Image (tube, grey):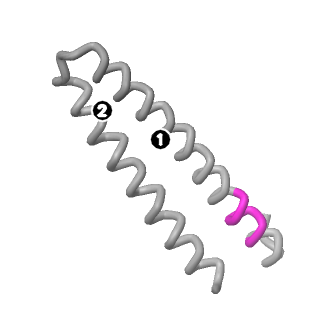
């Protein structure tokens, strides 16, 4: 698998997670029940943490590929 293929896969995962976070955020905006609001906030926080991990992985993949290509 090439780095470009890996980046496409990672970008797809990141886009999907961002869409899910946006969906949950919209749901949170209209939810009236306190227990459900708390659950949605927790899910959003967990997705944001996962998203940061994937973005960090993507950045390291790009950085390592650039170093391997002699680009900095």
- For the stretch drawn in magenta, the main secondary structure is helix
Q: According to the image, label 2 marks what residue? A: 25
- Answer left or right for 5 relative to 14: right
Query: Which residue is at a point 49% across and 63% down the rendered structure image?
Result: 11
Q: Nearer the viewer, residue 8 or 63?
A: 8
Find out whether the residues at labels 2 and 1 contact each other: C-beta distance under 8 Å: no
Q: CA distance from mark 2 to mark 1?
A: 11 Å
Task: From the top left corner, tell me how far across and down residue 33 is, in percent.
Answer: 21, 16
Quadrant containing the N terminus is bottom right
Q: According to the image, label 1 marks what residue? A: 47
* Region in magenta: 60-65
Q: Picture quarter containing residue 65?
A: bottom right
Label 2 or label 1, whichever comes before in sequence order: 2
Q: Picture quarter containing residue 27?
A: top left
**Label 1 crowd bin: few (<14), some (14–19), many (20+), radius 10 Å:** some
Quadrant containing the C terminus is bottom right
Q: Picture quarter containing residue 50?
A: top right
**Label 2 crowd bin: few (<14), some (14–19), many (20+), radius 10 Å:** some
Question: Is residue 54 on the magenta stretch?
Answer: no
- Answer left or right for 15 relative to 54: left
Query: Which residue is at a point 66% across and 56% down the rendered structure image?
Result: 57
């Amino acid at each position: 698998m090439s780095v470009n293929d890996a980046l496409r896969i990672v970008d797809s995962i990141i886009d999907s997670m961002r869409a899910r976070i946006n969906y949950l955020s919209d749901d949170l905006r209209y939810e009236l029940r306190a227990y459900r609001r708390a659950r949605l906030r927790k899910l959003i926080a967990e997705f944001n943490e996962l998203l940061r991990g994937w973005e960090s992985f993507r950045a390291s993949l790009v950085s390592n590929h650039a170093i391997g290509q002699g680009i900095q």
